[in-house]
Amino acid sequence: MLKNKKIVISLIVVAAIIIFGIISIITKGFDYSLEYSANTEMEIATGIKDIQTNVIEEIVDSILQNEESKIQVNDEKVYIISKNISEEQQSEILSKINEKYSINVAKEEITVNENMAINFGDIVNRYISPIIIATIVILLYFAIKYRKQNWLKVIGLTLAVLIVIEMLAISVIAIAGIPLSLYTIPVLLGLYILTILVLTYIFEKNK
């Protein structure tokens, strides 16, 4: 009785999280990481090799005032990406880098790109067909291998658990405001694979 009560409570909590997640997605949408948001990218060819990333970070932070940014130093070049870097801020950043390293890079010599936001839906669409095909193959495999355990129940349980786990993960991302990033899809795929492995273990145990 106590075990059944715990299962019911767990299902209610999961359902509540998913419902709140869906509401959050509809009302607020997802947050996006710097790579997926519209951003400004500065490329400064310094001509010197002893550029310290932490020094550039300090300069950028002092001017952008805690605005999210990404700094990369490579091959005598400094790359600065932030959601918005105004003309004035670009000039200030360049001026401080020139002063810090005693160089004289002109404003006209730097490359500035205004990047459009990446549509996360377009990225997801690339994975939909492979995931559907993989899921169909897995369901057929489970139906054949575990046919003595009531194959319809096996297929139904597998499909239900996969959907609930993925929706739960997406809901947590939405509610917690975790930005969608380059790591979101790999994490969701990893969760998908882990779920399949756990289900396989359970079905094998009940053979």
Image (spheres, helix red, strand yellow):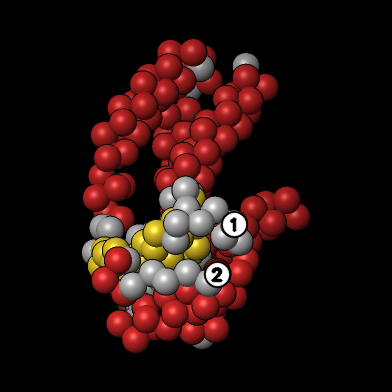
Q: Return the residue nearer the eye: 139 or 106.
A: 106
Q: Return the residue nearer the eye: 55 or 49.
A: 49
Is residue 194 visible from the viewing direction of this image?
yes
Question: In the displayed structure, would residue 72 be above or below residue 82?
Answer: above
Given the current orientation, which residue lies at the most extreme right position? 2
Element class at badge 1: loop
Question: In the displayed structure, would residue 184 be above or below residue 114?
Answer: above
Residue in the picture at 27% in, 54% down? 121
Q: Quadrant of the C terminus?
A: top right
Question: In the displayed structure, would residue 90 be above or below residue 204?
Answer: below
Residue 130 at x, y percent in the picture: 31, 31
Residue in the picture at 55% in, 83% down? 62
Element class at badge 2: helix
Quadrant for residue 136, please give it: top left
Residue 13 at x, y percent in the picture: 58, 64
How many numbered discs sit on the rendered protein?
Answer: 2
Asked if the residue at tag 2 contacts the one at tag 1, i.e. Cβ–Cβ closer than 8 Å, the answer is: yes
Is residue 161 visible from the viewing direction of this image?
no
User: How crowded is the residue under tag 1: few (<14 C-alpha within 10 Å), some, or many (20+)?
Assistant: few
Instruction: Residue type at mark 1: give it.
Output: Asp
Residue 83 at x, y percent in the picture: 37, 73
Residue in the picture at 50% in, 62% down? 71
Q: Return the residue nearer the eye: 158 or 190.
A: 190
Residue in the picture at 52% in, 38% down? 190
| Residue to which mark 2 is pinned | 101
| Residue to which mark 1 is pinned | 50
Instruction: Residue type at mark 2: give it.
Output: Tyr
Real-space CA distance between mark 1 and mark 2, rounded to the nearest whole angstrom: 9 Å
Q: Along the polypeptide, which appears first: circle 1 or circle 2?
A: 1
